Amino acid sequence: MAKCVTCGMQVDEKNAAAKSEYKGETYYFCSSNCKVAFDKNPQAFADKAKSGAHEHEHRH
């Protein structure tokens, strides 16, 4: 499972409504609307995804 970086919803990579490639990473989305939002400002969402993953690692 992946997390939609736009809204935070869990997304199954095999059944994702949409996906985008950005700086060598693949991002999966729960809807085409989330992909459109990501594509307008991918760096902001990529930074959010990385900071969110880092915070999650800290909690363990």
Image (cartoon, grey):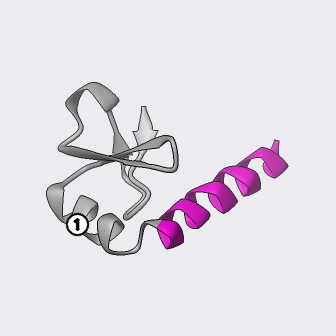
- Point out the stretch of residues depicted in magenta: 43-60
Disc 1 secondary structure class: helix
Residue in front for this viewpoint, 56 or 42? 42
Q: Relative to 52, does residue 24 appear above or below in the rendering?
A: above
Q: Is residue 42 left or right of residue 32?
A: right
Q: Relative to 49, does residue 37 appear above or below in the rendering?
A: below
**Which residue is labeled 1 in the image?**
36
Identify the residue at image location x=18%, y=65%: 33
Residue in front for this viewpoint, 13 or 8? 13
Circle 1: is it few (<14), some (14-19), or many (20+) Cα within 10 Å?
some
Q: Residue furthest top?
A: 14
Q: Quadrant of residue 17?
A: top left
Q: Position of residue 2 (x, y in %)?
A: 44, 38
Identify the residue at image location x=26%, y=63%: 34
Q: Residue furthest front?
A: 23
Q: Position of residue 19 (x, y in %)?
A: 28, 45
- The quadrant of the rendering that contains the N terminus is top left
Q: Relative to 15, does residue 34 appear above or below in the rendering?
A: below
Identify the residue at image location x=64%, y=58%: 52
